[in-house]
Amino acid sequence: MKKIIDITGTMQDGMWGYEAPFPSFSIRPLPPVPWVKGPVYCELFEGMHSQTGTYLETPAHFYGTEKSYPLIEVPVEKLIDLPCVVLNLGNWNMDAARGRRGITVEDLERCPNAGDIRPGDAILLGTGWGRYWMDADYLNLSPFITRDAMRWLISKKPFMLGGDSARWENLEKPEGIFPDFYAADILMIGPAVGLEACGAARSRLTVLPLKIPRTSCTPCRAVVIEE
């Protein structure tokens, strides 16, 4: 029997968002339509951008679409039913006094299914952070990835890497993870929610981004499927 786990964060008023100049996302009703008789029910999504909510991106986010490839060039068949390993590191708690916590190689290797990763897999890192999706400190206290952990992940040769943290770099004391990550030509998915519900050693992942040209990333719907 299949277990389908929706790992997509809900796009709604008051959700987390990147700081300015990124706009804040909100939903409001469409004003009356003068050229239609009777009411029209439709909503305007204001402040939506390519990194709103859960999104998928290519290395063009780092290099630009002139030096890399836009997301629309990734064939949709490569994003359906991907072999996937979810590494659940536990439910990490938000602690303003402690600040941000880094994901280490030791954290990754302690996962019982760390040895089940194969080249070409999607790897998702779960810290339980999705439960803070609507929290004001979701972004600025989210877990980051240490340099050694990123090297460990890149060495596994994944097709896609993601997790439930929205900020992989430690901006206060940068680890310098992104040059190596983007040079490895790995797609990025996240931030996700509900990864703690994933319990299989190996699973399947489907990610469907919006079909928009000339962009490195777009919001997407993502589900993990366990047998």
Image: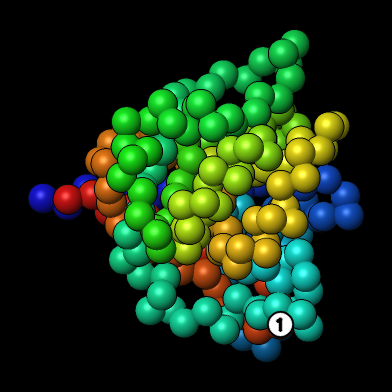
Amino acid on which the number 1 mark rests in the picture: Arg
Q: Residue at x 58, y 30 (%)?
A: 104
Q: Please, which residue is most extreme toward the bottom here?
A: 35
* Left or right relative to 128: residue 206: left
- Report x, y in % for residue 40: 57, 74
Looking at this view, name the residue that lies furthest to the front: 155
The number of callouts visible is 1
Q: How is the image coloured?
A: rainbow
Position of residue 131 relative to residue 40, above or below, is: above
Looking at the rendered structure, the secondary structure element under dot 1 is: loop
Residue at the limit of the structure toward the right, as seen here: 21
Residue at x-position 83% and y-position 32%: 173
The answer to whether residue 198 of the structure is visible from this angle is: no
Q: Quick check: 8 left or right of 144?
A: left
Residue 116's x, y, as percent? 31, 45
Local crowd size for mark 1, using a 10 Å CA cut-off: few (<14), some (14–19), many (≥20): few
* Residue carrying label 1: 214
Residue placed furthest toward the left: 1
